[in-house]
Amino acid sequence: MARQKEFVPEQALDKAMNLFWKQGYEGSSVEDLVQCTGLGRGSLYDTFGDKHALYLAAYDRYCIVSSGTLDALRHSSGTLQETLRDFFQARVEEAVNDPERRGCFMVNAALEMAPHDPEVAQRVQEGLAETEEAFYHALIKAQARGELAWTCDPHQFARFLVNMLVGMRVLARTNPDRRTLEQIVETALLLFR
């Protein structure tokens, strides 16, 4: 008869996600994962597989938890200026209010793992494409309302905004200075006046 699990896998996954988010894949040993989740090695491996499988599950969990930010961008009823300002200002707040300077798990994965891990690279590419699509959607709505000229290529601007977001996330890990980040946002918004 199989023993029933005496822990909630989602809670253990959240703890592992936070560890990977803070320390990265290479910076998180199996012993660190055992300590942070409170699980024994056997339970950890039986539930999630090896460290790499746990990292992928943690990455996927992060994407689910953070999906609301893109939903808010897609469904905003404000002007393009308001929508973009609100979106980026929320990212600034996340950066300056995170004492651990974790940044964005997806961006961290893009920098640390994607160059040599095809599974992570695929997930990061999908996440960046989804982010680009959310910006594209906001830009198309702005064009339909007459806020953005039809001569502007929404794909080009969406890619620019993704690049700006990724750059802000990287910068914020080393220097989460509110003034600097807000100046970057204001400069980008000049394109949409």
Image (cartoon, helix red, strand yellow):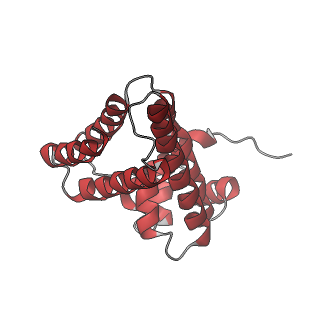
* Residue 11 horizontal side relative to residue 163, left or right: right
Q: Which residue is outermost to the top?
A: 77
> Does the image show residue 20?
no
Q: Position of residue 44 (x, y in %)?
A: 61, 55
97 or 153, which lies in front?
153
* Residue 124 horizontal side relative to residue 48, left or right: left
Question: Please, is residue 44 above or below residue 4 in the view?
Answer: below
Instruction: State the quadrant of the C terminus.
Output: top left
Q: Number of labelled discs? A: 0
Residue at image x 38%, y 57%? 163
Residue at image x 38%, y 50%? 161
154 or 73, which lies in front?
154
Q: Which residue is outermost to the bottom?
A: 116
Q: Position of residue 77 (x, y in %)?
A: 44, 22
Q: Which residue is outermost to the front?
A: 151
Instruction: State the quadrant of the N terminus.
Output: top right
Residue at image x 19%, y 42%? 182
Q: Position of residue 93 (x, y in %)?
A: 26, 37
15 or 87, which lies in front?
87
Question: Please, is residue 179 above or below residue 50 in the view?
Answer: above
Q: Which residue is outermost to the left?
A: 179
Question: Please, is residue 97 above or below residue 159 in the view?
Answer: above
* Residue 63 horizontal side relative to residue 142, left or right: right
Q: Quadrant for residue 125, please give it.
A: bottom right
> Does the image show residue 75?
yes
Q: Position of residue 41 (x, y in %)?
A: 59, 60
